[in-house]
Image (cartoon, rainbow, N blue to C red):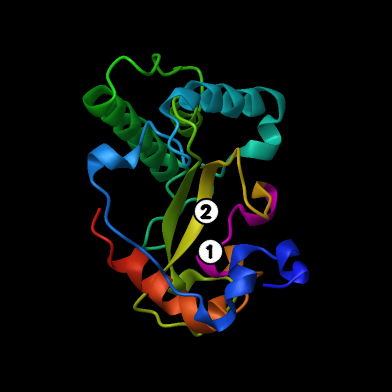
Amino acid sequence: MTHADDDLAPWQRLGPKFRLGLRARSEQEWLSHADAFGHADRRAAQVAEANHLLDTRHADVFAALDDALDDCSGHNRDGENALAASQEVLEMVQDNLRRFHPGTAPQARRDLHPLEAAARLIPEDLLLLAPRSRDDAKDGSDKDSGFLDWVLVAAALRFPAHWRLADKMGKALAGIHEPVPHYGEILETPMDRFFTRMAV
């Protein structure tokens, strides 16, 4: 690797070798209490920093398009689906913390959007993607209609890597990953296939 490579994002160094890398995680592993460096004692500090960002830079790190979520038939449900999905995320986070990390999280705040309330319990970022029928896509694309577009409709993104939340809200996966070299030719179809066929 040259010194010039030091300024590149990891995916820019990979070039056409970039692949979709997924592996299953158990529920117990989902919200690990050891951070990426293995220091479980640093988790409280990470939660505090994440919440500080929500308190001081809210518009930069949290967004929700609750009124913009259509169901797969293209009918707008006035944000009910996005709010319901956010509430489900909150319940999943609370359940995981109760079952695998008892005594580690305070009560979720009821005065907040449910995705923000969930995000305030953990240091991990939470991003909510919702399906949109490609028949209703505004770009007029002729993509495989067997897949759905997955649109970013809500997010608590305190620690982004090389992007800003405001630039990605309301975009489908292809638009979100547009700056990633070779995404369209290598990863777009596998990613869309994975999300569309994912069991939930």
| Residue 167 among magenta residues | yes
- Name the spot of residue 65 as percent of width and height, x first: 56, 44
Circles 2, 1 touching at the beta carbon (< 8 Å): yes
Task: Classify residue 102 by image quadrant.
Answer: top left
- Name the spot of residue 110 as percent of width and height, x first: 44, 17
Structural crowding at the residue carrying mark 1, measured as other residues with C-alpha within 10 Å and reported as few (<14), some (14–19) or many (≥20): many
- Which residue is identified by label 2? 152
Q: Is residue 85 above or below residue 95?
A: below
Residue at 23% x, 46% y is: 26
Question: What is the number of the mark on residue 95?
Answer: none
Q: Identify the secondary structure beneath mark 1.
A: loop
Q: Identify the secondary structure beneath mark 2.
A: strand
Q: CA distance from mark 2 to mark 1?
A: 6 Å
Lateral position of residue 6 relative to residue 150, left or right: right
> Seen from this angle, which residue lies furthest right?
4
Q: Residues in magenta? A: 166-174
- Which residue is identified by label 1? 172
- Name the spot of residue 183 as percent of width and height, x first: 55, 76
